[in-house]
Amino acid sequence: MAELLILMVQSPDGMKKIASTKRETAAALLKKVAKEFGFNTNGFSIYLNRNKTGEILSQNKTLSLLKIKHGDMLYLFPSASSSSSGEVMDTATPHSSSSQPSVSSSSSSSSFSSSSSSMIPRSFSAPQVQEDEIDQYLTKQDGKIYRNKDPQLCHHGSLGKCVHCVPLEPFDEDYLNHLDPPVKHMSFHAYLRKLTGGADKGKFAALENISCKIKSGCEGHLPWPEGICTKCQPSAITLNRQKYRHVDNIMFENHTIADRFLDFWRKTGSQRMGYLYGRYTEHKDIPLGIRAEVAAIYEPPQNATQNSLELVDDPKAAAVDEIAAKLGLCKVGWIFTDLLSEDTRIGTVRFTRNHDSHYLSAEECITAGYFQNLHSNPCRLSRDGHFGSKFVTVVATGGPDNQVHFEGYQVSNQCMALVRDECLLPCRDAPELGFAKESCSEQYVPDVFFKDKDKFGNDVTFLARPLPVEYLIIDITTTFPKDPQYTFCSTQRFPIENRDILGETQDFHTLATYLSQCTSTAFLDIVSDFHLLLFLVTNEVMPLRDSIGLLLDAVRSSNEDLAQTWKKSEQWATIEQLCSTVGGQPSSSQGYGATGGPSVPASSSAMWSCLHCTFMNQPGTELCEMCSLPRS
């Protein structure tokens, strides 16, 4: 026992203990180290000193002759050709081009070139991850905040720098707090720079996804509920307000997108939900920020009332995502209304969501967490290949001025984990409170805590039963541009899908009417409508899913020549023939040969819209159910 040696070997992957003896040779020791760390015998070198001096070579000398004693620290360095450990991530040089990407989450990425200026290392083995193009673009950026020379505080030459003008890091909290308005959350890429900065360059930086489930494969005891141990038991969770956010701004391209979505509530009084389709771009107002630009809203099948929303199965969901991808778009979020009229004469709505009630209810947080888990964010610093989500939530609700406001949110990664592992429940009578489930025989739930101040101002830890949902929410600024942008430039409005309750149907008679009313002679302007393209692909009479690719490319690139080429195809000729068969006379003034018919008088058995408050009333009534004014 006196000859037993315990040696500590430190490597970029961590430190391990190796058992040996004084009479053991250096070659035998190197074989033990290679087996323990998973190297081949030529894939590493071991030194007595951290500065790579005193290398231990594979020879027959004993450890006692090499003066290696019990408890000594040895230092392992992988060789340049070794790839099984100490892996360093591909890096990218700062991008000098002024162009910025507008991409979907499924778009392809290019490989990065290596550079020491923006190195993001990685000390663990993980699968190759295809990150979103906007993430690749921001990884290449310098990200630093450059400041001009201060005429009062800077006393150096034009080429010098001092503490008053040296560039700041993108995660500098003092800079973010002094912006107008102040920024509470740094961008996700600024957070990554903070993790991978410092003297070690983030050698051991890793993003860990929270798990609330018992680890599988523990054989030392019976499975839950008969047994559990510290190895397989998930750690308790203390909720903290997240310091970063994956999306820093939400921007609708123009007001028409939002107005058309709100028309359903204006006409029926029922709430509405839709999916936001757009792209992720750089948000230049925040260092290394990301913006979600909304180009269209798709409204799936749903059952709606004045106080509730229920989504039903959507058979067209896959087709919609496929069309959006071919148009260069992806699903960036979801939107729903929570509106109650206050005065129908002047068009005001109630201000119901505020600090005295709630901003997002617990049920809405759970739904947002569900959607964010479905659309996780690819990340190469995570062992799982994904971390967090860029999927956003937008609420159309009343503001302090009693006008409709659009508020953007995300839920934190902690909330995503609680929702994914089915640990969070809403409270029935308090929408602002959630409730962490208790463990039962079917499921073990770790303890969830949050910190708050008591009446004496002391920080106190509380069990999350119940839980204020503001610990789970991240707010995002939602804006509209001064100069409207249009991915879909059609000036005529094709009916939105799944609005049969309003009498707005998508069929070939509607298509014929739409084409006859278009005044533009450019075919691209006529077909550049998201809802029209969905109808052409998903209609049951003549779906064009396999033959519309050229037209989608034309809309995506705004290429009139491609659109004219597709217009000459047999598919469009068949569409025109179907439109003429529905009824109506050909419109000779239109260059595209579409046909339409005279307007059909409204049937007495159809729903009617009140002229005073626009509420949609049931057929057979003469007084408006909302304002009690006569139909005429």
Image (cartoon, rainbow, N blue to C red):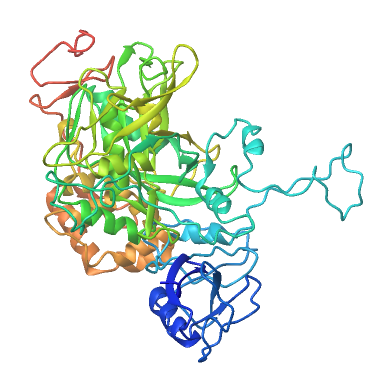
Q: Position of residue 575 (x, y in %)?
A: 20, 58
Q: Quadrant of residue 503?
A: top left
Q: Position of residue 342 (x, y in %)?
A: 33, 11
Residue 607 visible in this rendered orientation of the protein: yes
Question: In the image, what residue occupies the spot 36% across and 40% down?
Answer: 414
Where's the C terminus, which quadrant? top left
Numbered-mark total: 0
Question: In the image, what residue occupies the spot 83% across and 47% down?
Answer: 162
Q: Position of residue 88 (x, y in %)?
A: 51, 70
Judging depth in this view, the residue of 460 and 144 nearest the camera is 460
Judging depth in this view, the residue of 564 and 80 nearest the camera is 80
Question: In the image, what residue occupies the spot 32% across and 51% down?
Answer: 375
Question: In the image, what residue occupies the spot 22% across and 48% down?
Answer: 512
Q: Position of residue 36 (x, y in %)?
A: 39, 74
* Residue 307 higher or lower than 230, as above or below: above
Residue 493 visible in this rendered orientation of the protein: no
Left/right of residue 221 with respect to residue 358 in the rendered view: left
Judging depth in this view, the residue of 56 and 337 nearest the camera is 56
* Residue 32 higher or lower than 60, as above or below: above
Residue lying farthest to the front in this orientation? 2
Where's the N terminus, which quadrant? bottom left
Judging depth in this view, the residue of 204 and 298 nearest the camera is 204
Residue lying farthest to the top in this orientation? 628
